[in-house]
Image (tube, grey):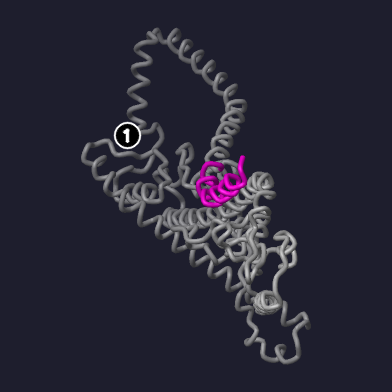
Amino acid sequence: MMPDQRLQGCRSLHFNEDNGRFVLLALLIVLYLLCGAAVFSAIERPSELRAHGRWNGTLLNFSETFNISLQDLNSFLREYEAAIAAGIRADALRPRWDFTGAFYFVGTVVSTIGFGMTTPVTIAGKVFLIFYGLLGCAATILFFNLFLERIITLLAVVMKAVRERRIRNSGLLPPGIRHDFSAYSLPGWKPSVYHVMLILCLSAITISCCASAMYTPVEGWAYLDSLYFCFVTFSTIGFGDFVSSQSAVYEHQSLYRVANFFFMLMGVCCIYSLFNVISIVIKQVLNWMLEKMSCLFCQRCNKANAFLGRRNAIRPGSKGRQARCGQAPDSDGPCDSDTEGRRLSGEMISMKDLAASNKVSLAIMQKQLSDSANGYPRTVCGSSRHNGFSGGVGALGIMNNRLAETSNSR
């Protein structure tokens, strides 16, 4: 491969980083699905086969005992399944389509929980659900994003105040700043995504444990089943095997239904925020993997880049230096010293060029020292395009530049 072709390959790798991240994530998700399917199949398939065997034995025994053919018995069971879909149970349940039941149903629709225990059966109801869910789900997602924005802002304010207090009490500040700490005030400080993830995780566990402590005595579920219901509901998976607030009568019924609504709302908002923060961590892993792949690829064209490096009046040998950092030729981020660039170029520069280069280097160093003193994120090799967090919409756009690991320095 010619040197120009190798350099072009490195450039195309940078320009297609977003596509590479998408493809890599898709492959990892497929692998994750295959592993999950294998695990669940190994765990649940034997139980399914045993349940089929017990049910077939029960049907055969019932048919022989009451002299009913299996065909008539299966026809009766199909009618019963249709009745269950319509909301009819052997036990007394609350009405599905009175105002209270309908309100519970639309709540599961717009939150995308979708338990499946209540569904419209009329044509008019199904058509209305399509348009109602389209607008309702969009509005609810907007609400979740606004909640995410405010919860991260609140956590950032609290964590920044705690950090300022620790710095004030540490005795490490100069005497002048110690008396007027408001002038210091950590202007560029941002909370770590890992700290925010830990706080949200603890909040989700606390809400789930409190809700499970309520569901266990009221619904008669085991505590582990209640925790399982909380995760399935709060994550909006909504299998429907466990559904709360379905009995006709409860002790302190009004209070229980209000508490059930509150736990569901807070749990869904908290888990939604946690999922989005975890997605940032996953994106960091993808960026790290792409960076390693890029370094392995660009090692083959380092020699070509060094050969193509040209002296620059300000930054001699900048192309070779940027290529070693995995940086695009047009990027202006500082990586190596000017001495290293001159050593790669193999040329000597005039005193005028040397003075100009030193002035620029001194200005860059002064800016870095100023940013470090003021608490701003440290500039590292690579432009903001490399981190994959610039711009964005929705939850990623909200968290952009609000957390330390999603700023332009990463």
- Residue drawn at 51 percent across, 13 percent down: 57
Q: Quadrant of the C terminus?
A: bottom right
The vertical placement of 262 against 296, above or below, is below
Q: Which of the two residues, 91 or 354, is positioned nearer the viewer here? A: 354
The quadrant in which residue 162 appears is bottom right
Q: Give the labeled residue for mark 1.
A: 86
Q: Secondary structure at mark 1?
A: loop
Q: Position of residue 359 (x, y in %)?
A: 67, 79
Residue at 39%, 10% in the rendered image = 70
Is 17 covered by the magenta stretch? yes
Asked whether residue 217 is in view, the answer is: no
Stretch of the chain drawn in magenta: 1-24
x, y percent for residue 309? 65, 58
Q: Does 11 appear above or below 160?
A: above
User: Type of residue at label 1?
Assistant: Ala
Q: Residue at x 31, y 49 (%)?
A: 134
Quick one: 335 or 209, which is closer to the camera?
335
